[in-house]
Amino acid sequence: MNSSVSAAVLAATRAAKDAQPVLARLHREAKDDLLLAMAEALVERAGEIVDANVRDLEAADAAGIEPGLRDRLVLDPERVAAIAQQLRDAAALPDPVGEVIRGSVLSNGLELRQVRVPLGVIGMVYEARPNVTVDAAGLAVKSGNAVVLRGGSAALHSNTALIAVLRSVLADQGLPEDLIVGIDEHGREGVDALMRARGAVDVLIPRGGAGLIRRIVENSLVPVIETGTGTTHVLIDASADLEQAEGIVVNSKTQRVGVCNALETLLVHREIADRALPRIAARLTGAGVRLHTDAAAQEILEGAGTPAEVIAATAEDWDAEYLALELAVAVVDDLDAALEHIRAHSSGHTESILTRDLLSQQRFLAEVDSAVVMANASTRFSDGGEFGFGAEIGISTQKLHARGPMGLTELTSAKWLVVGQGHVRP
């Protein structure tokens, strides 16, 4: 590792660590005012942010970036306004810091309270998602945390512009600019240094492709909250309302393809497959989706006149997170077969069943072991903003501390407050 990069990143993380107590002391009103000021500044300086984003888009187009990834990278005035609104939404949410989780008075008169406190310094590593720069910074501020951001070379100019705006607001408010730090300039070596900043960084949250997440989980010395890839499933059960199912599947797959809650594998119960697959395939292929089908689905679609956008699935397709207009499709014999397929291939992110059978619904909700499990709803609702969190810092697929969309509460830890009156232990 380059020693100068390591030193620079360590200095940045220590600066954030030194700044964080100032933020932790702020009351809710001051933090909310800060978020509102940041939102206003983003809108006022949207022109320079969009200009910086154009430079990233030009580089992405020259490199032949996938359409779904390019869509995540785009910032226009409307998207900047939407990002700013998420800061306003976060300001309107209750402040979790100081919330009493539980408490009691012991028989000896000793008073106990467990309260929420900031994690401290959060390190974020993500790819081609400039909106995450603002979401992460805003949620960190509201929950009393400093944040160190590494958003990847594809969004270098966009992230730099966004962070500059946010840091300028901190300075205007008389707060340390190092509450929000960017290390994009240090590239891949900067990530290596961040993973070794144990003691300066309290938790690291990777958000991106499987390779990025696996690299950080396997190599970080800093504790990691794992956000998983979205090998997301929808099951059309035998009793499903086909008109409703058609709308949900198309929305889950095509509403926005380059995101982790987009549908990647469609399972169809054999009893309904002859009726469901041709009409849904027609809608999907009409929207530009290419289908990777198993033999049973292929046979049904051939009988109905297979569109050109249908190909035979390979073993790799069942574990794929396409982030593109691609969809794996399989016919399953029954609910048990569907559950077995999901257990074998899910990344633990989001799964949904489309059914009118309450017993099937209850079994699916109870037995599927993913962070978000749905019934009769689009997978695109698996999102912190849609859940009312204001924004999200990621969707955790692990089982410790936080699971599912992570908002303000998930960016806090807890401590015990113990108040005595000269108590000594006998």
Image (spheres, rainbow, N blue to C red):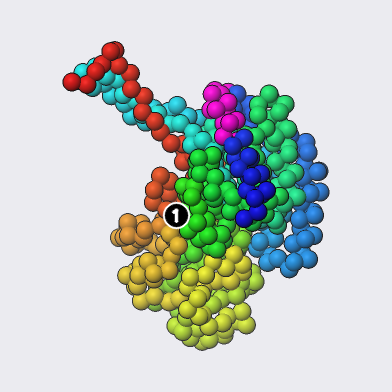
Residue 133 or residue 279, whichever sits in front: 133
* Observer able to see residue 379: no
Q: Measuring 18% from the left and 20% from the top, which residue is drawn there?
A: 426
Q: Identify the residue position indicated by label 1 in the image.
A: 397
Magenta span includes 97: no
Q: Give coordinates of residue 239: x percent, y percent.
A: 38, 67
Residue 393 or residue 415, whichever sits in front: 415
Residue 326 or residue 195, whichever sits in front: 195
Q: Which residues are magenta?
A: 16-29
Q: Give coordinates of residue 64: x percent, y percent.
A: 73, 68
Other-residue count near label 1 (Cα within 10 Å), few / some / many at <14 / 14–19 / ≥20: many
Q: Measuring 75% from the left and 44% from the top, which residue is drawn there?
A: 161
Residue 350 or residue 192, whichever sits in front: 192
Magenta span includes 28: yes
For this orientation, the residue located farthest to the top is 421
For this orientation, the residue located farthest to the front is 3
